Image (cartoon, rainbow, N blue to C red):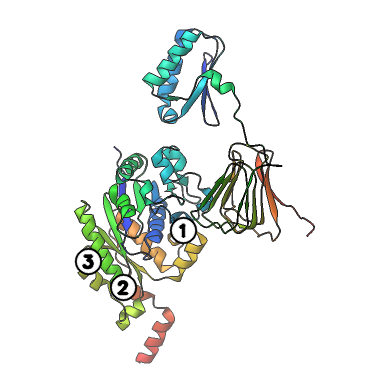
């Protein structure tokens, strides 16, 4: 079997097309075949760019034409723009903080470009989104998403931490289905080895 | 275009058991081996996810799918018990105007390609949310309880459905208490069918098991014993074209009281 020249790599927010060294005709054929086979998969997906070992700008342009015109995929921006790293909120140790002085109820959303402190409860069906940390001085039973722009060091802490779902950065974890024992201690959630872990922050109390 | 059949569960009045019925019919059909999606159109007051015990899995919702923030497959939540059962949850942080009837029609036609049955849970009322819920439906099931107010609202809804081209809706009577019917304190099935003049699809007895299972997030139809579970199973069989006799609710007043009656009648 001949080695595949075209491969696709999905990352946060879209797909990269990797192209190896080879005859341009074969590359083009293979690309069209693969796209046709998996049209459903690619429908609505964003193509972030093409990474090639040895293609001229003209050839890259031709491939871009095939992707956009023949298959009508979205190409987000060209290669140069992707090299820039997205900036993430860094004020999780010291930075902008919003204080919410009430209970957040079902259907309400708190969204802030910094840390959020809720002086009250967060009920099921409520959503807290922060670029930084989320601290709840009460029960957290809704959904909390800390580090929404990708800060994996953000934390979520609550006096009573029982969220429906916890998201930190790009990691999502959900409440277990069985009724696990409820901890009566204040707890903190953070990412360790790509998973959300929850532990008491006052273990001796 | 796919062959899936779309059914809206509606009532007009709130609190008569639309969501419970949707969850149980959806689960019941999946238990029979069909591919089923239950769609919650009650945007802003979603419940179906809670009743099915899938609330903790929601990442995207109906509004995200309709607005194109995610792909349809990403919005569908796989049930934790039954293969082939999926939930499309409503958004909680938006309101009914976030979706239009045209978008719903489009969505349902996409779901038709993937699923045998699309069961749509309608919100209470007859406003935009209701109009969204019926937009893509081929058929309607009307849920009512044996109360005049619920029957009145059901009648109104049947009229609106007919005006929107959904004819021949089927009736589900929920929360019948046979002891009260016998005493003459509750409308009986015949009274209700007389007023509404549509085909009866099922009768669900008032059953504590429903409250218990709803709170646990596990539809009652999955259990063996409760009478309500049998009633829902029968409805599912009828949907798939089988002829099933209606439950004889009188039979279930309890063996003990029957023995007592026998003893005293001598």
- Residue B259, quarter of the rendered image: bottom left
- Residue B173, quarter of the rendered image: bottom left
Vertical order, A205 against B68 (above or below): below
Do the CB atoms of the residues marked 2 and 3 lie less than 8 Å apart?
no
Q: Which mark is residue B51?
A: 1
Q: Which mark is residue B147?
A: 2
- Between the C-alphas of marks 2 and 1, the distance is 24 Å
Residue in the image at 45% along x and 63% along y: B224
Q: Position of residue A174 (x, y in %)?
A: 58, 49
Circle 3: is it few (<14), some (14-19), or many (20+) Cα within 10 Å?
Answer: some
Chain where mark 1 sits: B
Which quarter shows the C terminus of chain B? bottom left
Q: Earlier in the sequence, mark 2 or mark 1?
A: 1
- Between the C-alphas of marks 1 and 3, the distance is 29 Å
Q: Position of residue A24 (x, y in %)?
A: 47, 8
Secondary structure of the residue carrying numbered label 1: helix
Circle 2: is it few (<14), some (14-19), or many (20+) Cα within 10 Å?
Answer: some
Residue A203 appears left or right of A18: right
Q: Foreground: A5 or B48?
A: B48
Circle 1: is it few (<14), some (14-19), or many (20+) Cα within 10 Å?
Answer: many
Residue in the image at 41% along x and 63% along y: B229
Q: Earlier in the sequence, mark 1 or mark 3?
A: 1
Q: Position of residue B73 (x, y in %)?
A: 44, 39
Q: Which residue is mark 3?
A: B196
Residue in the image at 43% along x and 37% along y: B71
Q: Is residue A162 visible?
A: yes
Q: Is residue B137 visible?
A: no
Residue in the image at 38% along x and 65% along y: B15
Vertical order, A195 against B231 (above or below): above
Q: Position of residue B100 (x, y in %)?
A: 32, 45
């Amino acid at each position: 079997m001949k080695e595949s020249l075209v491969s696709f790599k999905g990352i946060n927010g879209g797909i990269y097309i990797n192209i190896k060294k080879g005859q341009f005709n074969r590359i083009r054929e293979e690309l069209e075949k693969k796209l046709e086979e998996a049209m459903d998969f690619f429908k609505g997906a964003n193509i972030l760019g093409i990474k090639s070992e040895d293609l001229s700008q003209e050839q890259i342009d031709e491939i871009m034409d095939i992707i956009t015109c023949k298959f009508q995929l979205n190409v987000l921006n060209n290669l140069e723009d992707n090299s820039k790293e997205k900036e993430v909120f860094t004020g999780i140790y010291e930075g902008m903080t919003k204080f919410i002085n009430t209970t957040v109820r079902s259907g309400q959303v708190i969204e802030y470009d910094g840390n959020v402190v809720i002086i009250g409860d967060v009920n099921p069906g409520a959503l807290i989104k922060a670029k930084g940390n989320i601290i709840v001085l009460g029960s957290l039973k809704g959904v909390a998403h800390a580090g929404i722009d990708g800060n994996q060091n953000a934390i979520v802490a609550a006096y009573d931490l029982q969220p429906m779902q916890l998201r930190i950065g790009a990691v999502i974890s959900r409440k277990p289905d069985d009724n696990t024992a409820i901890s009566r201690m204040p707890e903190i959630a953070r990412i360790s080895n790509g998973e959300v872990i929850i532990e008491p922050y006052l273990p001796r109390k | 275009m796919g062959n899936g059949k779309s059914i809206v569960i509606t009532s007009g009045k709130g609190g008569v058991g639309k969501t419970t019925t949707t969850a149980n019919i959806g689960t019941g059909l999946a238990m029979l081996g069909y591919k089923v999606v239950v769609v919650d159109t009650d945007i802003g007051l979603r419940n179906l996810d809670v009743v099915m015990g899938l609330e903790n899995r929601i990442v995207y919702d109906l509004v995200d799918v309709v607005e194109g923030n995610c792909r349809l497959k990403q919005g569908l939540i796989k049930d934790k018990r039954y293969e082939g059962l999926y939930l499309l949850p409503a958004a909680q942080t938006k309101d009914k105007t976030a979706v239009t009837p045209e978008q719903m029609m489009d969505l349902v036609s996409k779901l038709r390609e993937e699923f045998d049955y699309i069961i749509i849970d309608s919100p209470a009322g007859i406003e935009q949310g209701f109009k969204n819920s019926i937009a893509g439906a081929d058929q309607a099931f009307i849920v009512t309880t044996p109360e005049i107010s619920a029957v009145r609202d059901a009648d109104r809804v049947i009229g609106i459905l007919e005006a929107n081209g959904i004819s021949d809706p089927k009736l589900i009577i929920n929360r019948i208490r046979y002891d009260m019917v016998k005493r003459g304190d509750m409308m009986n099935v015949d009274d209700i069918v007389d007023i509404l003049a549509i085909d009866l699809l099922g009768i669900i007895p008032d059953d504590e098991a429903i409250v218990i299972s709803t709170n646990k997030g596990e539809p009652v139809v999955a259990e063996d014993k409760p009478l309500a579970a049998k009633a829902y199973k029968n409805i599912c069989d009828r949907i798939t074209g089988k002829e099933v006799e209606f439950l004889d609710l009188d039979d279930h007043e309890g063996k003990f009281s029957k023995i007592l009656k026998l003893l005293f009648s001598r």
